[in-house]
Image (cartoon, rainbow, N blue to C red):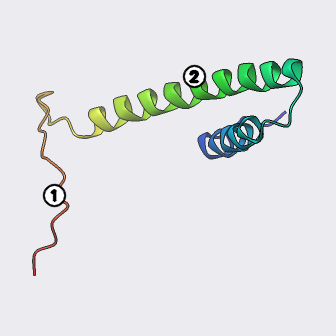
Amino acid sequence: MAKQTFEQAIKQLEQIVQELESGDLPLEQAMKKFEDGIQLSKFCSKKLDETEKRITLLIQDKDGNLSETPFDTDVHD
């Protein structure tokens, strides 16, 4: 079985939300979908945390100091 990617998990989670919002699922099936959604949500959260840690390592200087610069959303000409 191939490893699941973040993008695949998000896509599955979106599908589960749509199915649950439809209200057409029997209770037991809705509960199973909800449980699956929780697991996917935890997986995605873990992946985001891992990515944040990797980025933090990448922006450390040679002395281990981190520099944080706010992301500028304004476009200057």
The extreme bottom residue here reads 77
**Label 1 belongs to which residue?**
72
Identified by mark 1, the residue type is Asp
Whether tag 2 and tag 1 are in contact, CB under 8 A, the answer is: no
Q: Position of residue 62 (x, y in %)?
A: 14, 34
Q: CA distance from mark 2 to mark 1?
A: 30 Å
For numbered disc 2, what is the local secondary structure?
Answer: helix
From the viewer's perspective, is 61 left or right of 19? Answer: left
Quarter of the rendering occupied by the N terminus: top right
Q: Residue at x 73, y 37 (%)?
A: 16
Identified by mark 2, the residue type is Lys
Q: Nearer the viewer, residue 67 or 9?
A: 9
Q: Earlier in the sequence, mark 2 or mark 1?
A: 2
Q: Residue at x 28, y 33 (%)?
A: 56
Q: Nearer the viewer, residue 36 or 26?
A: 26
**Label 2 belongs to which residue?**
42
The extreme front residue here reads 23
Question: Crowding at label 2, few (<14), some or many (≥20) Cα neighbours within 10 Å?
Answer: few
Quarter of the rendering occupied by the C terminus: bottom left
Q: Residue at x 13, y 39 (%)?
A: 68
For numbered disc 1, what is the local secondary structure?
Answer: loop
Q: Relative to 71, does residue 44 appear above or below in the rendering?
A: above
